[in-house]
Image (tube, rainbow, N blue to C red):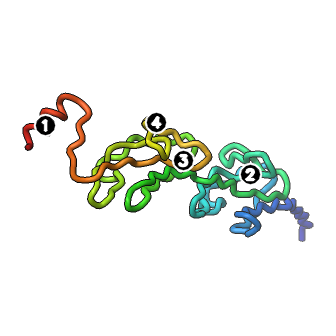
């Protein structure tokens, strides 16, 4: 009989926890120096009013496509509040949400605020209707309120010569 020598190499896997707030949503184990695969990542968290903007190790962004795991770690979901553009003044407020730097053009007539028995006149940056609101709007990090001005009754609002001609021919 021959002597057989066997040897084994053991690699201690590294533990990676993914947390949303203080809740652990997934735990995986990887070889040291390995990157995380798409299958190892948890689903992106869906928190009302917030957008997911990546995983962080402390205050450092962890690029799951490029960074590797060299030690046990906890990655935290970075959630960014989605700011709102609120259009006040109608029977109900109209609210659009976005991410910082998203651009919103002037709402179509479908999304314009409505007020029973009144005609929508325009958007204003102030409650006194002194400063017209400029479109497009670029979302920041805070909510923004825009004020819808109405005039009582049913009116055809024209803003140029072509609109005047169309309104005049319709009457």
Q: Mark number for residue 56?
A: 2
Which residue is situated farthest in the top direction here?
161
- Residue at position x 24%, y 41% in the image: 157
Residue underneath mark 1: 166
In front here: 129 or 48? Answer: 129
Mark 4 vs mark 3: which is more N-terminal?
4
Residue underneath mark 3: 144
Mark 2 vs mark 1: which is more N-terminal?
2
Q: What is the secondary structure assignment of the residue under circle 4?
A: loop
CA distance for labels 4 and 3:
15 Å
The N terminus is located in which quarter?
Answer: bottom right
The x and y percentages for residue 82 are: 57, 53
The x and y percentages for residue 109 are: 29, 49
Mark 3 vs mark 1: which is more N-terminal?
3
CA distance for labels 3 and 1:
34 Å
The x and y percentages for residue 94 are: 42, 56
Q: Residues within 10 Å of mark 3 (few under 14, many from 20)?
A: some
């Amino acid at each position: 009989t021959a002597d057989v020598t066997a040897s084994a190499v053991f690699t201690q896997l590294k533990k990676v926890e993914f947390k949303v707030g203080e809740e652990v949503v997934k735990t995986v184990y990887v070889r040291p120096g390995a990157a995380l695969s798409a299958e190892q990542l948890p689903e992106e968290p869906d928190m009302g009013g917030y957008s997911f903007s990546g995983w962080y190790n402390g205050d450092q962004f962890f690029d799951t496509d490029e960074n590797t795991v060299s030690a046990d770690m906890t990655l935290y979901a970075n959630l960014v509040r989605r700011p709102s553009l609120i259009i006040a003044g109608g029977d109900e407020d109209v609210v659009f949400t976005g991410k910082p730097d998203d651009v919103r053009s002037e709402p179509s007539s479908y999304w314009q605020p409505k007020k029973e028995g009144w005609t929508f006149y325009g958007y204003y940056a102030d409650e006194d209707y002194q400063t017209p609101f400029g479109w497009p709007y670029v979302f920041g990090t805070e909510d923004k309120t825009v004020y819808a001005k109405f005039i009582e009754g049913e009116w055809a609002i024209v803003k140029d010569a072509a609109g005047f001609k169309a309104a005049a021919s319709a009457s």
